Image (cartoon, rainbow, N blue to C red):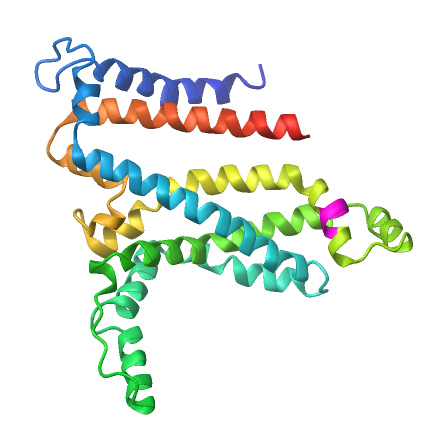
Amino acid sequence: MFMAPSLAGVIVFVIAPFLDVFKRSFTTAVTGDYAGLQNYKTIFENQAFLIAVSNTIRFTLVCIPLLVLIGFLIAFPLSRLKSAGLIKSIYLFPLAMPTATIVMVWKMFFYRQGFLNLFLSKVGEWSGLWGEVHTDYLGTETAFWVLVFSYIWKNTGYTVVLWLAGILAIPEGQIEAAKVDGAGSMRRIIYIILPNLKGTLYTIVILSFLNSFKIYREAYLVAGAYPHKSIYLLQHTFNNWFVNLEFDKMAAAAVCTGAFLLVAILVLQKMWDREI
């Protein structure tokens, strides 16, 4: 009974709409006639969709390990400081900034006449090693790494907070006992701290995995609906199909994406359950 209101909300606003999308993935967009698996065949023959899938998977595989590692390398030293709470709040600042503001900063920094090129041009002028720099970072393969940098900059804060919560929850007695037994800092990290952080690591990986599929706002506002090929993501494909009223293809792609996310999360859960 306590769960009934929440469950009802999930059924009405999540499960029922998804079932409707699942049904539409087998019909035509205009007439609603049954089309079988034609919509699924169409999206897997669509080059834009395949590029978007490849870029999204690549982005996820690059960003999650970097975010987890950077967050831990920041959180572990912070856990020893008395002022960790204040510093933790500073790291959360990027999450509080509006996306449009962040995008404006990236544009000013990375576009052809932006701050980065001006800085590099000045360095080249002072050193005599190169001339003026006018690299279009958002119009070349570098755009992918600009997007990676944006994602890590924005999400490091909550990762640090989660790592800190896990580290500070480890019983101090275990660490002190390891010290008494002669374990050095690295051994304490490997044999005491990391094994106690498996639950925290699982939470961070899942949240980071889901957030990596939400980077579309930054990519769209920076480079528009048709950005450089390296940052053309699944959400770009969905947006363009929606604008063109291609709801049948969009429904089929949404079902495939939802199924992939579900399988990935179940696999991660199985891996963690086996290790724990």
Whether residue 96 appears in this view of the structure is no
Which residue appears at 44% of the width and 24% of the height? Answer: 263
Q: Which residues are magenta?
A: 189-193
Q: Nearer the viewer, residue 241 or 132?
A: 132
Q: Quadrant of residue 33?
A: top left
* Above/below status of 235 relative to 134: above
Residue 272 place in picture, x, y as percent:
61, 30
Q: Nearer the viewer, residue 270 or 81?
A: 270
Residue at the front extreme of this rendering: 129
* Above/below status of 247 relative to 121: above
Whether residue 240 sits left or right of residue 83 in the image: it is: left
Instruction: Quarter of the image for the N terminus: give it.
Output: top right
* Above/below status of 61 relative to 3: below
Q: Is residue 204 magenta?
A: no
Which residue appears at 65% of the width and 38% of the height? Answer: 198
Residue at the right extreme of this rendering: 180
Residue 55 place in picture, x, y as percent:
30, 43
Q: Nearer the viewer, residue 60 or 34?
A: 60
Instruction: Quarter of the image for the C terminus: give it.
Output: top right
Whether residue 19 appears in this view of the structure is yes
* Above/below status of 90 relative to 215: below
Which residue appears at 24% of the width and 45% of the height? Answer: 232
- Decide whether the magenta segment is chiefly helix, strand or loop: helix
Residue 82 place in picture, x, y as percent:
72, 64
Whether residue 178 sits left or right of residue 168 in the image: it is: right
